[in-house]
Image: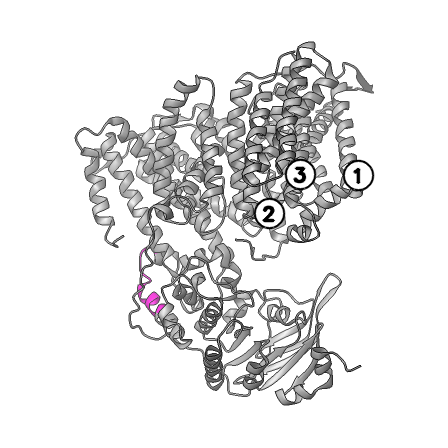
Amino acid sequence: MSRYWPLPALAACALVPWLPGLPVFWLTLLNYIGISAILVVGVVVLTGIGGMTSFAQASFLGFGAYASAVLSTHYGLSPWLGLPAAIAVSAVAAGLIGAVTLRLRGHYLALGTMAVAMSLYYLFANLDFFGRNDGISGIPPLNLFGLSLVDGRLYLTLIWAVLVLVIVATNNLLDSRVGRAIRSLRGGALAAASFGVNTPAARQLAFVYAAVLAAIAGWLYAHLQRSVNPTPFGLNASIEYMLMAVLGGAGQVGGAVLGAVLVTVINDQLQDWLPRLLGQRGNYESIVFGLILLAVLQTAPEGLWPHLFRGRTRKRVIAPAEALPRRVMPQAGSPVLAVERLSKRFGGLIAVNEISFAVNAGEIVGLIGPNGAGKSTSFNLITGVADPSSGAVRLFGTALTGQPAREIAQRGVARSFQHVKLVPGMSVIENVAIGAHLRGQAGALAGVLRLDRAEEARLFAEAARQLARVGLAEQADRKATDLALGQQRVVEIARALCLDPVLLLLDEPAAGLRHNEKVELAALLRRLRAEGVAVLLVEHDMDFVMNLTDRLVVMDFGTKLAEGTAEAVRRDPAVIEAYLGAAQ
Amino acid sequence: MDSTIVAILVQDGIVNGAIYALLALSLVLVFAVTRVVFVPQGEFVAYGALTYAALDSGSTPGSLWLLCALGALAFVAGVIRRGPVLRLAVTSLVLPAVVTGLTLWLAPLKPGVAVNAALALAIVTPMAPYIYRIGFQPLAEASVLVLLIAAVAVHLVLAGLGLVFFGPEGSRATAFADFSLSLGDLTLPGQALWILGLTAALMAGLYGFFGFTLLGKALRATAVNRLGARLVGIATAQSGGIAFALAGAIGALSGILVVPLTTVYYDSGFVIGLKGFTAAIIAGMGSYPGAVLAALAVGVLESFSSFWASAFKEVIVFTAIIPVLLWRSLRHVTLEDEEE
């Protein structure tokens, strides 16, 4: 799709309603499709992209609708003032619900919002202020330049123009620094946190964004319908919006529109036909919808959109941009990392037992040992992914222990993972750009309004530079998870380099690489060493380790067995026994 | 408000809470074994109640035909997935046929409370494992959230079917026993004693099942680690079916116990089920004793709120979840979910 599609789309919004012969019935249907689509775009961002499930989206619709209804009827304010009020009320409500549930495991948000949806429904239905079950009627229509939007045609233009703007804003958001943080939440949250992404804040943002879109839809709904009552804001309505997203394709914004069209039209047809076929008694459309939802989840969990519109991978143009400012590197040989009597116990198992070692600037230290020796656990302790049971980790003498992963990243510690953690569905270069997250500042609003382009250009120029440095420039626009596993490990290194690290922790970087790829990797690590980067390396390939490292730390069963140069370690009887067994 | 009213409210709350406790237990059980948040639990309550009420009035419950249809579908689904045909035929074709035969024979005879309750259980319980096989088994490896959405879809279908098979009218059944027990000012009706007694007995039974039987231990192993359980030879799909069957039976029994006390409609189950959820969530979806205590608390909270602000009792009960989640959230160290 061309990036200029919004212009013809807006023109269509203005013209289509006036098509001669457009039945009023279709006009009404299109109005409701547009309103649903606005809300479901939010569901796509929240659920399909952010990996969170909310059953309160219809409640946020209700917040928006009731806010504007109350202001314009009880207080006689202009309906236009209802819009900011609707947005504010929903955003605050979502902020509160999010604060309570988003730090917990995923299903708490789903269940918490389910309970909230129930209690809000009963609240709307029982408070005199909201007109109880009858709701509020006599809501004034919107006026635009003295023109009253009572005519369904004018209103259709307004709704679909808002939808176009919402889609543009959402695409802008997703293609920004904050957007990459949101996109990393599903399947890549741990890695993103290790590169300084504030994942709870990203979750909160996605949730509030979805609630705001629902509020805008609710405001449009209230002034279209000119009356509100609790029914369309109940739990079942939220489930229907969920169905729209899942059916259309929750992974893409386009899926929201497709789902809204399909579900609204099918619903209308079913309500028309099913009673004729099966008699009056029954709520057959909910049965059919439930079955459709189950069938889609079982056979095409990604929804219909990817099957109808094969997404072309867009080639990202890397414009030359001013280089990002770099960290001041410490003097070669000066102490960077100090690990002091570090221990980690899992119940009765001591995974890491009183380990101490140091890594200096401009030095490559290898951490080796048999499987299960506690190497990866040590990595997780150093990078704040896990908390040590006792002991300390110091960077330039300051304790890192107890700091969250993103704080440690902020100080210049970058890592790769033993089990590759790239964000599925994101291109190689976008994954690498997550590494530079902390080197940008642009927030969500700047992203939506495209005020972040200069900074984005700099971030992507840096990502491209690091990608070229590891020899994967050609692969920049491919889906990261389509690469061979060895190459994915190298992508992780490029991502780590984007942080501009003082300390680089690599977990089995050479695994899965071919011989000449290993040679290139070793050359790259030597160059980094020459620049003053401190490198800590876990690796099983002994040739690679022995030739590259300045010092080795050997671990076995959680304890340090030996430390020294490759040559000394190789002759150490304790090491030989651990690797080869004792001579009988 | 005097002490008599307090006593009555507490008694009411505990009786309702006992039902919520049963539901909360089965929700925790299903979640632990299959990772499915079993939203349709409430429909099993309604189905159990309305099936029992129909039998009680001497008519044939519509859910009988639903049982046969689900059995046939489950058979087809099992055969497509190359399950053992003979066993599938016995569990999903012969079983519903036998239950249908018995019901058609016995129902017009008005065979009494015990037989009616047994028949209602036999009609409703097998639906749960059939639904597991049709709806959830193909998704066994999906994420918790996908399973949750699937559970919501099943809830939609079952609620719609409930209207088709039972109609929009509510039903009520005669009580199990017409005796009552006087304790000072307080009169405990026989039905309340039945509820408390059966709940306690069921909990003891579950405790024994999970603590001392091989099958129960297999379910617990599946709950702890699906892959590990499979590696030591436990059929995890079968464990899922058993967990669903237990949940279905508990749901249906709750309905049977409730329907003499209050009129049940085809959609009443959902709200009752959600209160079971509230209790399960308060207990963190993991602890059985915690779920029981939380359920009793939810029941008491509900009966007091219906005394003070009856219009807002649902609001109060469902909002009770928020402070609990807040407390959990403050205590909880954020760990990134590695599940997609």
Q: Is residue B315 magenta-colored? A: no
Q: Is residue A453 magenta-colored? A: yes
Q: Amino acid at mark 2?
A: Leu
The answer to which quarter of the image holds residue B131 is: top right
Coordinates of residue A182 in the picture (x, y in percent): 44, 55
- The CA span between labels 2 and 1 is 34 Å
**Residue segment shown in magenta:** A448-460
Residue A536 versus residue B44 in the image, above or below: below
User: Residue B243's mark?
Assistant: 3
The answer to which quarter of the image holds residue B305 is: top right
Quick check: can you spot residue A75? no
Q: At 75% across and 30% down in the image, what residue appears?
A: B199
Viewer-side residue, B184 vs B194: B194
- Mark 3 secondary-structure assignment: helix
Do tags 2 and 1 sit on the same chain?
yes
Coordinates of residue A159 in the picture (x, y in percent): 29, 38
Coordinates of residue A570 in the picture (x, y in percent): 66, 86
- Mark 1 belongs to chain: B
Q: Amino acid at mark 3?
A: Ala
Mark toward the start of the polypeptide (3 vs 2): 3
- The CA span between labels 3 and 2 is 30 Å
- Mark 2 secondary-structure assignment: helix
Which corner quadrant holds the C terminus of chain A? Answer: bottom right
| Identity of the residue furthest to the left in this view | A20
